[in-house]
Image: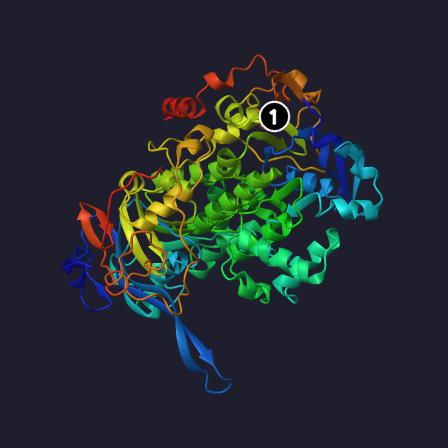
Amino acid sequence: MTQPLLRVTDLRTYFSTEEGVVRAVDGISFDLQPGERRGVVGESGSGKSVTAMSIMRLIEPPAGEIVTGRIEYKGANLLEMAEDEMQAVRGGQIAMIFQDPMTALNPVYTIGDQLMETITLHQKVSKREARDIAMQALADVQIPNPVARLEEYPHQFSGGMRQRVMIAMGLSCNPDILIADEPTTALDVTTQAKIMDLMLGLADERNTAVLLITHDLGVVAGFCDTIQVMYAGGIVESGSGDEIFHNPQHPYTWGLLGSMTRLDQAQQVRLHSIAGAPPSVIDLPVGCRFRPRCEFAQDICGRVLPPLVETGAGRSVACHFAEELDLKAIDVRHRETEAEEVIS
Amino acid sequence: MTDTMDQAAQPSSVSVGDLPADVIMRVNHLVKEFPIRKGVFFKKQVGAVKAVTDISFEVKSGETLGLVGESGCGKSTTARSVMRLLEPTSGDVWFRSKTRNKVVNVATAGKEELRGVREDIQIVFQDPYASLNPRMTVASIIAEPLVVHGKGDKQERLDKVKSLLKVVGLQPEHANRYPHEFSGGQRQRIGIARALALNPSFVVLDEPVSALDVSIQAQVLNLLDDLQSEFGLTYLFIAHDLSVVRHISDRVAVMYLGRMVEMADRDALYDRPMHPYTHALLSAVPIPDPKVEATRERILLEGDIPSPINPPSGCRFHTRCPIAQMGKCDVDEPQLLELEPGHWVACHFPEIKQVI
């Protein structure tokens, strides 16, 4: 395989708070290939957004700090770059779209001003050329009447339209990587469908790699080639979409899939639920972080943190019993209903 | 919408016999508008947000009716109006009150009557962070409805709180803690315990799991299932997540811009939807399975949802509808009609379409 576009190695991002050190991201490694669509899924507090912020170097000391690790973009370590070099990468080669389009846009500048600021920052163009690029960018995200819309302010746009502007801004400099952090979470489902279609269509056209961060397994199922599942600051499993959804090898992924309600599930079955709640990232359990909630846990899980090991081509799992457990054979929901019938 | 529904009597309460035995609530022609006022002194009304326009439906005893739609469709306003947390602009809400032992029109009931009804109807809110007072202990939060309605003495209330905590899967020892000591899922359990304190028969669940992570969502949904069978509760379940609604509901009603567009038994609505808005809505929901997703086709809607201040003429969906026929849909407002037994649709050109 060629050199990956982005390689993250043993990244650790910690935050110091009054209660103690929050190990938000604690030793994760992954690659992103050119044109790849990679989904980062996990529940709140799993470290998925901090992963994105770390790549963009948006972690502000002294509150937060990237303690160790390497983030290599085309071979150059972003963590060792001077701030002005990083500025060129940020927004130029790696762009980011945030969850909340209401707060990500500045309410006192017009949409045109904000788009043109990004463009003039990264491209040597005149103001007039920047305006043309901005207009084209709005047209690309299918905003009707882009010339007039350039002069308008964010409050004159609906939520879906604002997210289109964010995408236009993100893609205006033709980045190699687009990091989308919960881009459709604040939107209604019919708007979500349109925005995802649009964003990934544009990314495909330009061969932009997408790192899609979301808690919604449905969204990743439809749009990602590869998926990494995060839990309490670590990656517990990664692989192709098919593999993750149809052959989960980590008990957390397996439990998560079982606890989802599905639109196409006609039969009313009892949901599998993972007992308890995710651990506090301040006071992580010793050994495997999922152990307190894992129904397959054994002695070793309480002592040794399982590393992320390759179990097949492009397939890694962080579980001591990944090889032994045949999770696919255990129909999680079916088993649960049977057990309950016995009790009642 | 039907003749039988218009037969509802005029006085604010009638005897228990007037609703069919299996119906606990009947909503007739409910309208809720929020006036828009201008000016400092006179506050002249210059318009109104038409949040809910003429909707009628029944809730059967012991069932879960799911009310779905996107933001601004009026689902929460409907739920709050049927329990008089909002004053309905017009319409009737006939409710079979257990404590009063008669059918009460919640929409017009006087203060005293309403107080009785409020024991029967309770609500669980969406945001488990905002709906619990951070300065109150869990015990005083859960006991508050008992205090307000003058139930029991101090010791009896504490006993009730402890048993409620057990019912919702928390420990009786948690009674003296404060909300911030609990996670989102646990807080939602506290909110549910509070809603159950007065032994209600009807519970409005307003997006009860939307703020929770998936693994916690499953715990709370299972709990709601258990409580329903244990206490024979009737649920009005408001949600925007159509897969959650499919899981929990017996029947489902879909709203768009203040109007009910389709209502049917759960599987009929998901497997044989007839309204073009329901088609688009269902087709937009992603399914967590790449193989299924690869074969699905989405129906993408044009434009944004129109303003409820000045809703479109005729069918409110005609501006975005892929099958709208001008001259008909932009002129005539379609009525909600029963096209198949139990399957109600408000569309001039209904068509069964499989979209999942």
Instruction: Report the residue marked by disc 1.
Output: A237
Residue B53 figure quarter: bottom left
Q: Quadrant of the C terminus of chain A?
A: top left
Q: Is residue A15 visible?
A: yes
Furthest residue toward bottom: B41
> How far from the left and from the top, in percent, is residue A47?
66, 38
Q: Is residue A271 left or right of residue B128?
A: left
| Residue ID at (69%, 21%) | A307
Q: Chain of mark 1?
A: A
Counting labels gives: 1
> How far from the left and from the top, in percent, is residue B13?
23, 65
> How far from the left and from the top, in percent, is residue A301?
66, 20
Report the colour scheme: rainbow
Question: In the depicted view, which residue is nearer to us: B44 or B282?
Answer: B282
> How far from the left and from the top, in percent, is residue B208?
46, 48
Q: Quadrant of the N terminus of chain A?
A: top right
Q: Is residue B178 visible?
A: no
Q: Is residue A251 above or below residue A219?
A: above
Q: Residues within 10 Å of mark 1 (few under 14, many from 20)?
A: many
Furthest residue toward top: A324
Question: In the depicted view, which residue is nearer to us: B270 or A321?
Answer: B270
Element type where label 1 sits in the image: strand
